Image (tube, rainbow, N blue to C red):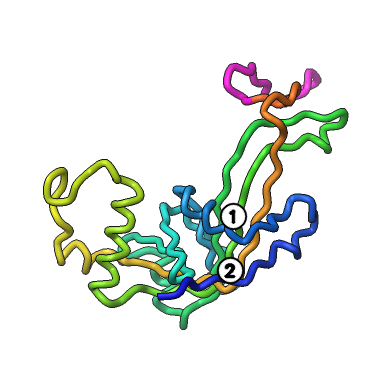
Amino acid sequence: MTERTPTDVSDDIRYGGKAIDDPAWIPEFLADQEAGVLGLVDDDTPHLVTQLFVYDPEAGAIYLHGAQAGRAHDLVEDGDEPNATFTTSEKGRYVPADEPVNFTVEYSSVVAYGTVDFVAERPEKRRVLQRFMGKFAPQLTPGEDYEEMATESIDRTAVYRLDVDSWSGKEGWKEPDHPDAYDLDGVERDDGGSDDD
């Protein structure tokens, strides 16, 4: 199977200096990330679901899974391959500036757009669920450390396939020795309240 590559729309990002121009970067970033947010629309109301995911570069698809119940399940079931979006990101250190409006944070992120539907065929569902186990429990061996996936388990699991039509990636990182960048670990926090309160 040849690899299916979504259209890269990173050049459309408002702040072009953050846009990714390496076509291999987005698939590599998606392969490394663990959780992301699936965005659906319920009438006029956005509905967001945070999920573990796997990305299959050959299919050009992001896979998620969950119970065969709930709002997200119903939206996909009731729709005809509804439009969806997905995002995942990685946060680094905070970077101060002379004015609070210019404070920033180090980050990398991807936003993907496409349509979502269920994986219906049992062999495909098994393949995707095994891919999850390979990503999130690579140190464990099926049949030794845990039972092989039972047919009943596969049948009661909803597997979502987001076929990615387009995506964009961006990042902003400072040098490792940037003098002012900091983590919040060990920083005494203030709730932001005023002395006049």
Secondary element at tag 1: helix
Res. 158 image quadrant: bottom left
Amino acid type for the residue under numbered disc 1: Trp
Query: Which badge, 2 or 1, comes first in the chain's sequence?
Result: 1
Alpha-carbon span between mark 2 and mark 1: 17 Å
* Residue 194 is one of the magenta-drawn residues: yes
* Disc 2 and disc 1 in contact, CB within 8 angstroms: no
- Neighbourhood count class around disc 1 (C-alpha, 10 Å): few under 14, some 14–19, many 20 upward: some
Q: Is 46 situated above or below 132?
A: below
Q: Residue at x 55, y 74 (%)?
A: 83
Q: Position of residue 161 (x, y in %)?
A: 42, 69
Q: Is residue 125 left or right of residue 36?
A: left
Which residue is nearer to you in this view: 126 or 47?
A: 126
Which residue lies at the image location 57% right of the left edge and 74% below the top edge? Answer: 165
Between 127 and 66, which is closer to the camera in this rendering? Answer: 127
Image position of 132 with respect to 192: above or below: below
Q: Residue at x 14, y 61 (%)?
A: 150
Question: Picture quarter containing residue 120?
Answer: bottom left
Q: Left or right: where does residue 194 sit relative to residue 161?
A: right
Which numbered dot is residue 113? 2
Q: Which residue occupies the extreme front position in the image?
A: 2
Q: Position of residue 80 (x, y in %)?
A: 46, 83
Residue position for label 1? 25
Q: Label 2 is placed on what type of residue?
A: Tyr
| Quadrant position of the N terminus in the picture | bottom left
* x 68%, y 52%: residue: 170
Side of 169 where 60 appears, left or right: left
* Outermost residue to the bottom: 80
Percent across and percent down for residue 42 are 53, 70
**Residues rendered magenta in the picture:** 183-197
